[in-house]
Amino acid sequence: MRFVATPLFLLCLTAAAQEPVTPVSPAPPSARVVENSYVVMFHGRSFTLDGLREAIYARRPAAEVETIVKDLAVAAVRDQADFSRAVGELGGRVVSHYWLINGACVSNIAAERVDDLRGLPNVEAVHENRVWQVVNNIARNASNHEADQANLRLIGGTVPAVGRGVSVAVVDTGVDRNYAGSGLPHPSYYIGGNQGNNQGGGLNGSRLKGAYGVPSLGNVTEDGHSHGTHVSGSAASDAAAYRGMAPGAWVVGIKVADDQGFGNTNTLVEGWQQVVARRTADNILVANNSMSGSPSLSEPAQVALDSAAFNADVLCVVAAGNNGTNTTASQNAWNGLAVGAIFKSSLTVVSFSGQGPLAGFGRTYPDLAAVGVDVASTQIDNPNPFAQDGTSMASPMVAGGAACVRQVDPLMTAREAKATLLARTKHVQTSRNTYGLGVLDIDAAVGAAIAHDYGKARLTSAAPVWRRQFTLPTFGNYPIAIAWMHPPGAGIDNVDLRIRDAGNNVVASDLNTLNSYEKVIVSTFTGGTFTAEVTWVNPVAGRTIDFGISGIGSLLPTAPPTLTTIAPSSVNNPAPAQITLDGTNLEDITRITVGGIDLTTFTVVSPTRVQFGLPGPFLIGTHNVTTTNVIGTSNPLQVTVNGVHPMQLIAPAFSIRAFPTNINGIGDRNWVTVLYMSTSTTPSILPGLVNLSLGNNFAELYQLAVLGNDGRGTWVLPVIVPASVPAGLVLLWQAITVDPLNLVAPIEASNRGQTTFF
């Protein structure tokens, strides 16, 4: 399959079309690539993104997430070192080492060497580095997306639903950070459009939370094109003349396209890495990318988008493309939302709007629709709005609406927000290949979020069917939607939604096989009790699927959890075993507390079972274990963490003279350790008292320190070997340890460590 770029004028139709005039569908896009540049995907690597995903979903501090990202970047370079050398031998060089996806971008590879590139060890696929192109405001009112009404709704009775505190990342041509050379962001990024109001919490007091570039474009951030600035205004402008859908949200600009509007596969992957890297620090919960792209799930930029959504809990929104039924340059965005374009007043689909089935994939397309004709929004270096047409303009309206929805509850996941937006669309049509699931209705979605008419649940290979009873109050049509994601690079999952009445009859169902969501509308004349049934049709052993659901009321627990058993109840440092808790109401717990320390990383196996691992080494002793949900905290059970016997000594195999070398040990809490050093492997033995495997019968044994073990049984001693010592010196380490309150013989000795200094 050939994935192609779309010329600029086809993606942003600058002439403002008014009904009944219909913009003409442009010709099919033409192929463009970055010459001698390729994106390479690998079979395997030494690390996963599990720790990053767990930290983000557990809402760990930004500094912790930043450290994880830095470590991932270092690991990617390390893993690809042999590949980089091999690429150099082919006359090329690696310009980007990816960590968000398992790949890299190379340049300077002549066409005749591409087969050699494919033949390198661990190379799974070689993709051309494709060029991709960038592809209110009356749309706020009740006739369109109802943002005016949504922004008047109060969260907790006091805070307006305007996206406040949520960042929308605009992955595009940049943003107007330096308005007309003033050094200040564009007025539309300020509260009330007033550059004198510095309470926005972002750059120079604006609501522009950050502006970032990517390495392949020189890390430039400023928008010299205006597409990204226009898109950001549709999502979050607070200028009186053209407010965006979320006028209180922060904007994070990420420049992935140059000032002619062109990016490529590599810049997009780098851009999605920026989204994830800044996710926690800038609270990026929504991202918009209004560019052309690929309908293939395996295309690297699409893998990166799906990875950002899955691993960083970001609702990724994209434009559906401006080539009508030719969707060969439309983004798949399986884990996100693809948005088609409609006219303002009639809400009819514009002929240029991307329409499915999606090329080469077959899923219905787009996912929903928003206004994409005559959209007035921000232009660079100018206080006045200008109008543009295109799905580029429709997509950020959904992104802004998503920011309003996710503002309601900081713990709402991207899956739950997606299900809520899709459940509450209006102007629902029978053909999902024109409107998707309907037209964006921000007010209805925000109302559902405030009412907590959403929740999350899990399917497992052992329990692939989930059921929950709910009540519909009276006569009416009630929408229900579910949404889920797939791990990037993996096959898609087929999940079905059925609604059964009190007699177990199926009264509504959606059995779509290719999309990441299902939606039904339940029609009832009397109301009553129903059951939502979600089925994982093609379960994979050992995997789970988390899904969001909206339309059946709150899934919040009604009682605190209870605990009945813990197994094992005794574990050993340094890496305590996985612990299983059984009880009731465990499906919605928010934390497990062990010895006063809150753990937010755990696995909910079922409503009656949860599993977790203690971070090792853990505090030694017997600790109370409790679980907590939004209602309260469970009764305690107890777990005992045991010390390490004999003590484990950890020393690096190699080190550098004149720099600190850490010698570590782990034993039992509050014991006393004596650390020795030697160059001799001849043992030192006092029968019945001590047995060391170094020191030459104590003649070459040197005591370095007497150390007190901490509450985890650990200690660390930095040792510096002077630069004057000859390179190649080999030092041996061993420790003895005693309980000062219970002296016994023989004295416990650790293993022996060995370090060579260079």
Image: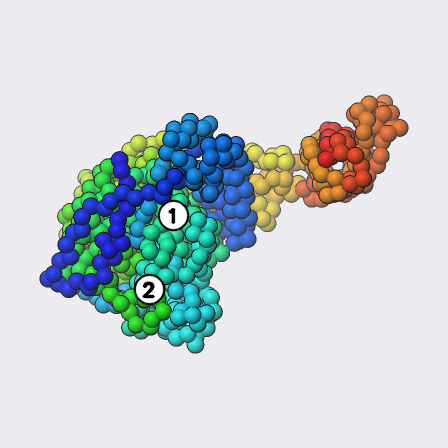
Which residue does the image show at 36% across and 69% down from the upper left?
381
**Quadrant location of the N terminus?**
top left
Q: What residue type is labelled 2?
A: Gly
Q: What element carries label 2?
A: helix
In which quarter of the view is residue 175 placed?
bottom left
Question: Can the viewer see residue 413 in this picture?
Answer: no
Tally the marks.
2
Question: Can the viewer see residue 243 in this picture?
Answer: yes
Which residue does the image show at 25% across and 37% down from the upper left?
361
Q: In the image, which is nearer the foreground, mark 1 or mark 2?
A: 1
In which quarter of the view is residue 743 placed?
top right
Q: Position of residue 393 (x, y in %)?
A: 27, 59
Q: Where is residue 130 in the image (x, y as percent from the top left)?
A: 33, 43
224 or 43: nearer the eye? 224
Which residue is label 1 attached to?
A: 268
Q: What residue type is labelled 1?
A: Leu
Q: What element carries label 1?
A: helix
- Residue farthest along the left direction in this orientation: 20
Which residue does the image show at 53% across and 50% down from the upper left?
66
Q: Residue 233: give its label.
A: 2
Q: Where is residue 325 in the image (x, y as percent from the top left)?
A: 17, 45
Q: Position of residue 527 (x, y in %)?
A: 20, 52
- Residue farthest along the bottom direction in this orientation: 196
Above or below, 685 against 196 in this view is above
Give whichever of discs 1 and 2 has the lower sequence position.
2
Which residue does the image show at 37% across and 54% down from the upper left?
258
In which quarter of the view is residue 497 placed?
top left
Left or right of 378: which side holds 24? left
